[in-house]
Image (tube, grey):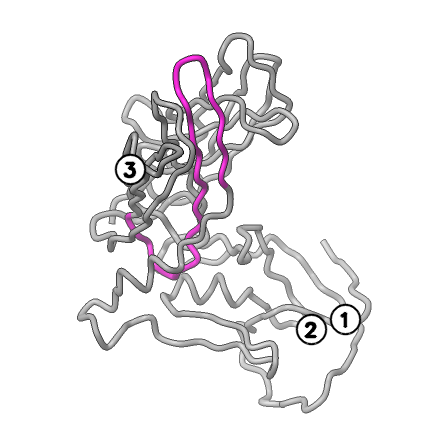
């Protein structure tokens, strides 16, 4: 497939072939032909799905015989920090190891790179709920932990809950659901990051699609990687007019509690009786053996 791009060619790209070391001191505009040919990236036998900072797939392409790859995806795969200096138009690459840690993992620094991108509150006849959606903006695969406390109008704690997960990979998103029987006025949480020593992330290799009826959603998850994706769990947030009204969870796995490479597993998840919804958000977790 061929696409023509008019105007300035924008984006942070790495050419996989060595080109002449020309440096442009001024901005230029060019017309170029981009060729897309389903180019794949593999690192040590493991396929890498290139994504941008928002988790969207970015397809490599060819210009004048040179193949270009998205710099963030390549840097993350190689364990290198990547940043962008807009003042000098510079891609900044640096080793992720810290002088203060033998393994290069600084838990407090990594925790600061976990952002809360969404927060929801809703209640049912039985409980009061909070959903917190995290994004891993670091270059590490981590084990995240969230400690949340519910407080009444006087600031007194009326409930507390701790949750953790495995193999939260760079660029991935994850939803934690908390509930409390008592009505609460406010809540606070602390997010920490542990170094993942036992598993690899696999969510970036999973392709999730879904369909909906009036009462449920049918979830299909395909493993595009070359390792078994183990204990693939989904969280579904049922929404109506942008507000969460219910949630459910389950597993998309086979009898071995995994999704084998190239295979698709599915499950269906129902909304509570009497709840109406017009959209869903789905978040996956899972892990692969190192």
- SS at mark 1 in the image: strand
Query: Mark 1 sits on what residue?
Result: 32
Q: Is residue 26 left or right of residue 248?
A: right
Query: Mark 3 sits on what residue?
Result: 163
Residue lying at the far front in this picture: please name it: 154
Q: Nearer the viewer, mark 2 or mark 1?
A: 1
Count up the numbered dots: 3
> Which mark, by number, is residue 64?
2
- Do the residues bearing badges 2 and 1 touch, measured as CB atoms within 8 Å? yes
Instruction: List x then y, in percent, for residue 79.
Output: 36, 66
Quarter of the rendering containing residue 173: top left
Q: Residues within 10 Å of mark 2 (few under 14, many from 20)?
A: few
Between disc 2 and disc 1, whose residue precedes?
A: 1
Between disc 2 and disc 3, whose residue precedes?
A: 2
Residue 6 vs 149, above or below: the answer is below
> What's the distance in space between the residues labelled 2 and 1, CA to CA?
8 Å
Residue 182 vs 200, above or below: the answer is above
Residue lying at the far left in this picture: please name it: 102
Instruction: List x then y, in percent, for residue 167.
Output: 31, 46
Residue 215 vs 141, above or below: the answer is above
State the residue at coordinates (50%, 64%): 72
State the residue at coordinates (52%, 20%): 218
Q: Nearer the viewer, mark 2 or mark 3?
A: 3
Between disc 1 and disc 3, whose residue precedes?
A: 1
Q: Is residue 282 left or right of residue 192?
A: right
Q: Main secondary structure of the magenta part?
A: strand
The residues colored magenta run: 119-143
């Amino acid at each position: 497939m061929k696409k023509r791009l008019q105007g300035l060619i924008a984006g942070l790209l790495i050419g996989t072939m060595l080109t002449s070391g020309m440096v442009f001191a001024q901005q230029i505009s060019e017309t170029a032909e981009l060729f897309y040919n389903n180019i794949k990236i593999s690192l040590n036998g493991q396929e890498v799905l290139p994504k941008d900072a928002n988790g969207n797939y970015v397809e490599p392409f060819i210009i004048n015989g040179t193949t270009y790859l998205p710099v963030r995806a390549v840097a993350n795969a190689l364990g290198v920090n990547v940043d962008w200096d807009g003042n000098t138009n510079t891609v900044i690459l640096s080793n992720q190891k810290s002088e203060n840690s033998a393994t290069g993992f600084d838990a407090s620094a990594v925790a600061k790179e976990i952002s809360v991108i969404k927060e929801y509150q809703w209640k049912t006849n039985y409980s009061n709920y909070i959903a917190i959606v995290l994004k891993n903006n670091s270059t590490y695969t981590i084990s995240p932990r969230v400690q949340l406390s519910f407080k009444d109008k006087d600031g007194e704690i009326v409930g507390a809950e701790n949750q953790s997960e495995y193999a939260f990979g760079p660029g991935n998103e994850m939803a934690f659901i908390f509930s409390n029987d008592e009505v609460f006025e406010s809540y606070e949480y602390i997010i920490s990051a542990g170094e993942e020593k036992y598993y690899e992330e696999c969510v970036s290799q999973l392709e999730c699609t879904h369909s909906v009826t009036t009462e449920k959603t049918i979830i299909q998850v395909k493993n595009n990687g070359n390792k078994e994706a183990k204990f693939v769990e989904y969280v579904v947030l049922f929404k109506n007019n942008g507000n969460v009204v219910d949630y459910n969870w389950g597993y998309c796995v086979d009898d071995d509690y995994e999704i084998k490479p190239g295979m698709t597993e599915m499950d269906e998840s129902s909304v509570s009786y009497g709840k109406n919804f017009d959209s869903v958000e789905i978040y996956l977790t899972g892990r692969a053996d190192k």
